[in-house]
Amino acid sequence: MAKPAKYNAAFFGSIETAFKILKQKYGKRAALEFLSELMKRNLSKAYAAMGAKRNGGPTEYKRVVGARDAAVGLKVSFRNLPSGFTYRFHTDPFPGLRGEVAPEELDRTYMEFKRDYLLGPAWSYKTTKHLWRGDAFTEHVFEEK
């Protein structure tokens, strides 16, 4: 996996600011819907540029997500499990949104897209640990249904 670039505070900060403005003007639901659409468009463009295979399985997920996260300065890791794998964030991508939204709601804005695009409908995920709850990392466990 590529060594992470320096954390891109300006990139993530602009997303945090947009979320806060939309939440204030239109409510949390609208802000979350906007963020989901923003993530979908940005990540699909990035993944396509990387030659990502849709429904490519865990190996493709780790390759594409690991490289993209490293490019924007996020330290992540993966661990194989008998029925799937874990995806761990060691860097909080959106520290400025802590207290603004529940961690599961925020994570859903990009995790569901990543799962659907790279793994497909045969996979589910659950969040077992979270930086916002004092854990050492945020952990998403993916399993084949």
Image (cartoon, grey):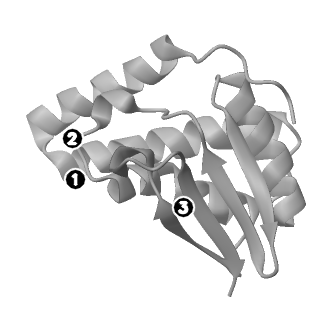
The x, y position of residue 97, in whole percent, is 30, 34
Density class for disc 1 (Cα within 10 Å; few <14, some 14-19, many ≥20) is few
- Label 3 sits on residue: 112
The disc, 2 or 1, on the residue closer to the chain's N-terminal end is 1
Asked which secondary structure carries label 3, the reply is helix
The x, y position of residue 87, in whole percent, is 67, 55
The amino acid type found where label 3 is placed reads Glu
The disc, 3 or 2, on the residue closer to the chain's N-terminal end is 2
- The answer to which of 51 and 11 lies nearer the viewer is 11
Residue drawn at (57%, 57%) of the image: 139
Q: Quadrant of residue 1?
A: top right
Q: Quadrant of residue 35?
A: top left
- Label 1 sits on residue: 29
Real-space Cα separation, disc 2 to disc 1, in angstroms: 15 Å
Asked which secondary structure carries label 1, the reply is helix
Relative height, residue 56 to residue 76 (above, below)? below
The amino acid type found where label 1 is placed reads Arg
Q: Is residue 121 visible?
A: no
Residue drawn at (73%, 34%) of the image: 68
The quadrant in which the C terminus is found is bottom right
Real-space Cα separation, disc 3 to disc 2, in angstroms: 22 Å
Relative height, residue 105 to residue 123 (above, below)? above
Relative height, residue 10 to residue 80 (above, below)? above
Real-space Cα separation, disc 3 to disc 1, in angstroms: 16 Å
- Label 2 sits on residue: 99
Density class for disc 3 (Cα within 10 Å; few <14, some 14-19, many ≥20) is some
The disc, 3 or 1, on the residue closer to the chain's N-terminal end is 1
Left or right: 145 in relation to 56: left
The x, y position of residue 61, in whole percent, is 79, 55
Residue drawn at (72%, 17%) of the image: 5
Left or right: 10 in relation to 141: left
